[in-house]
Image (tube, rainbow, N blue to C red):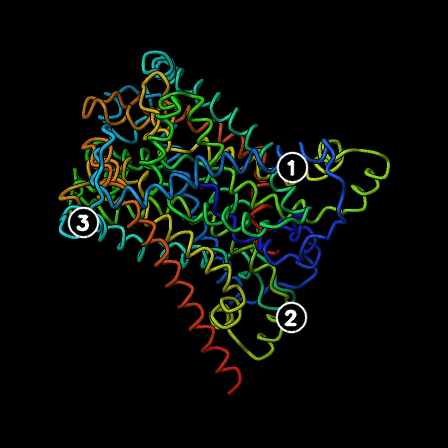
């Protein structure tokens, strides 16, 4: 995808900046004010995160002594105890399993569905498309009670497969909706050429169309990963067995279960453990994420 | 789903209709292809998403308590009960406050920051962004990727009366009355403090969205406005906002849907609903009614109320946008 973000534009503009003479005073004032405001906002974003990181190395006593103090000795005790005794390791593993499986399944089902909706015409196509859109808009809370009993009936309540199934179903509308324009934009001639060469419907999809839609698949997969990793309501309502907890609900129960006796150092360490995967994804795909947001508006 | 914020931007529905294909014989390849490619996803969607939504409407008109098969139809009794349920009405009111404040503040703030990033550069020559804007965008976008529950937990610690960083900073600069001020435990501050957390998490995302929209505006518009002597604020107000109106509308609707939910943030900041239920939101009451009290009929009615609130909010935003743009058209012609 073409991402004409500020960076590329800045790069292009760089020579003109140097070519012009000193900007007038008014410009400098505006630029300074902008830098101050944007800098202030950036600090407001960074400080809580850095403070969390710092606190994750402190003992509870140190945390209560002063919010500013540095940890007396830097070690990973909090991380180790959060991972083992607090069950964060278990929750982490559950989350990886659930999000990993759901992500793979929803990307496969979603791209198949989007491909058929985008590239074939048949009665009811439009209706399916709009009911997917409606499925995105309605609050999940409306469906949560019946969903609980649907899963109970098929025996998947409080199980990881049940959670995976629900994740897939609720991520499907987003996936289809966002992949639809990608398949739509693919040149039909290539598929037709493959057909002339004798490739069946299945083969044309997996060997011709799907690889061409790869950029679209990548950005949808990133957004789905974040959405599923951060999912909270579905597990809280549908997955109440402690050994099956995912990270988000494990964190919530960790924070609330002990009331005022929470081991804060451990809590901060658990917070860092939960954030690290999304931080890694963000660091790697930052450009692509912002690019997708930008691209959305230009359509 | 949280990731849905992007969806309406790609207005795929307006794409040209699919090419008509000539009729083909129904080979095994073709039949199996359609069954799997369309049938499988749709079956899942119908069974796990559509079917529960439909059932919710039926349940909301019964007195079902869940674990027994008997339920009787009670019409709109549940809805009547909700109107007389003071705690639920408090929750509705809290969600309404959130839906009024959060989208407005987030959109204004992210628009202001986006404007600074894009057009705060020199006032002559080409329209260009601020130096180092990439850095600001990368930093402020990051909270969008952090799980909402974690954002809530981090800020719950920030607001902690004795060990939180906020009171530490405030007393550090000499404001001693904040020594152990309970931001989340005081009826006056609990709601604004919670609203701030939600806004903090979303400003960066919408800033990036607005930056992209502003960059999509042809620079001739800005050149012409400058030629006519328009200042920066005038340009932002009369050129930028009208031209990115649809993006603003999308942002507003998504933020509204989020504010009418707000469950995760509130569950992290004040699991019990806050002092005097001042931060209790509808979903919290719904989950309690359903899974703690077993009043599934009543809880389903709450879910339906939430859905209606979402639709009403979207309708209001669409109407306001249409009215405002209608005025502009008239002014333009006059």
**Above or below, comparing residue B42 to residue B216 in the picture:** above
Q: Secondary structure at mark 2?
A: helix
Determine which of the numbered discs, if any, sits on residue A42 in the image. none
* B198 vs B309, nearest the viewer: B309
Number of the front mark, 2 or 3: 3
* B64 vs B69, nearest the viewer: B69
Quickly name the residue at label 1: B34
Number of the front mark, 2 or 1: 1
| Mark 2 / mark 3, whichever is N-terminal | 3
* A142 vs A229, nearest the viewer: A142
Q: Residue furthest right?
A: A197
Residue A160 place in picture, x, y as percent: 42, 21
Seen at 57% across and 55% down, the residue is B11
Residue B40 shows up from this direction: yes
Q: Are marks 2 and 1 on the same chain?
A: yes
Seen at 17% across and 50% down, the residue is B188
Quickly name the residue at label 3: B77
Question: What quarter of the picture does the C terminus of chain A occupy?
Answer: bottom right
Seen at 56% across and 60% down, the residue is B214
Mark 1 is surrounded, within 10 Å at the Cα level, by few (under 14), some (14 to 19) or many (20 or more) other residues, namely: some
Question: What quarter of the picture does the N terminus of chain A occupy?
Answer: top right
Residue B327 located left or right of residue B121: left
Quickly name the residue at label 2: B220
């Amino acid at each position: 995808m073409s991402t004409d973000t500020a960076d590329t534009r800045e790069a292009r503009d760089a020579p003109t900046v140097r070519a012009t003479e000193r900007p007038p005073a008014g410009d400098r004032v505006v630029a300074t004010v902008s830098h101050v405001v944007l800098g202030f906002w950036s600090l407001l974003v960074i400080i809580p995160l850095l403070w969390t990181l710092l606190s994750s190395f402190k003992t509870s006593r140190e945390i209560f002594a002063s919010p500013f103090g540095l940890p007396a000795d830097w070690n990973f005790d909090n991380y180790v105890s959060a991972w083992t005794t607090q069950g964060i390791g278990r929750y982490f593993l559950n989350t990886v399993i659930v999000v990993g499986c759901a992500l793979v399944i929803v990307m496969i089902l979603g791209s198949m569905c989007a491909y058929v909706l985008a590239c074939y015409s048949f009665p009811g196509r439009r209706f399916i498309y709009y009911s997917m859109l409606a499925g995105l808009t309605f609050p999940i809370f409306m469906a949560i009670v019946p969903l609980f009993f649907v899963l109970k009936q098929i025996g998947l309540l409080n199980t990881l497969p049940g959670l995976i199934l629900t994740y897939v179903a609720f991520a499907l509308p987003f996936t289809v909706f966002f992949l639809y324009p990608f398949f739509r934009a693919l040149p039909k001639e290539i598929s037709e050429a493959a057909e002339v060469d004798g490739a069946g419907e299945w083969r044309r999809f997996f060997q011709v169309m799907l690889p061409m839609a790869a950029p679209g698949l990548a950005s949808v997969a990133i957004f789905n990963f974040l959405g599923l990793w951060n999912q909270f309501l579905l597990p809280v309502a549908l997955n109440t067995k402690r050994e099956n907890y995912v990270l988000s609900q494990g964190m919530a129960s960790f924070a609330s279960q002990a009331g005022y006796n929470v081991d804060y150092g451990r809590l901060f360490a658990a917070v860092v453990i939960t954030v690290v995967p999304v931080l890694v994804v963000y660091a790697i795909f930052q450009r692509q994420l912002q690019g997708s947001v930008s691209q959305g508006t230009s359509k | 789903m949280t990731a849905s914020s992007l969806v309406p931007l790609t207005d795929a529905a307006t794409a040209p209709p699919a090419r008509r294909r000539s009729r083909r014989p129904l080979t095994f390849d073709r039949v199996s292809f359609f069954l799997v490619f369309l049938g499988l996803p749709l079956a899942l969607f119908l069974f796990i998403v559509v079917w529960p939504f439909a059932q919710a409407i039926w349940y909301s008109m019964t007195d079902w308590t869940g674990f027994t098969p008997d339920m009787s139809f009670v019409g709109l009794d549940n809805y009547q009960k909700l109107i007389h349920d003071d705690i639920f009405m408090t929750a509705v009111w809290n969600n309404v406050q959130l839906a009024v404040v959060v989208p407005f503040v987030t959109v204004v703030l992210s628009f202001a920051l986006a404007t600074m990033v894009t057009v705060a550069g020199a006032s002559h020559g080409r329209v260009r962004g601020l130096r180092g804007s990439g850095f600001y965008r990368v930093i402020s976008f990051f909270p969008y990727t952090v799980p909402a529950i974690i954002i809530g937990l981090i800020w719950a610690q920030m607001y902690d009366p004795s060990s939180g960083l906020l009171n530490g900073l405030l007393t550090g600069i000499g404001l001693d009355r904040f020594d152990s001020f309970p931001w989340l435990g005081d009826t006056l501050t609990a709601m604004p403090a919670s609203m701030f957390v939600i806004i903090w998490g979303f400003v960066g995302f919408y800033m990036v969205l607005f930056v992209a929209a502003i960059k999509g505006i042809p620079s001739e518009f800005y050149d012409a406005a400058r030629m006519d002597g328009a200042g920066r604020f005038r340009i932002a107000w009369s050129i930028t906002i009208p031209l990115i109106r649809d993006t603003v509308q999308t942002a507003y609707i998504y933020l509204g849907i989020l504010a009418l939910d707000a469950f995760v943030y509130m569950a992290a900041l004040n699991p019990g609903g806050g002092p005097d239920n001042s931060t209790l939101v509808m979903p919290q009451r719904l989950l309690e009614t359903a899974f703690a009290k077993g009043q599934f009929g009543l809880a389903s009615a709450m879910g339906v109320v939430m859905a209606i609130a979402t639709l009403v909010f979207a309708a209001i935003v669409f109407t306001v946008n249409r009215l405002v743009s209608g005025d502009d058209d008239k002014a333009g012609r006059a």
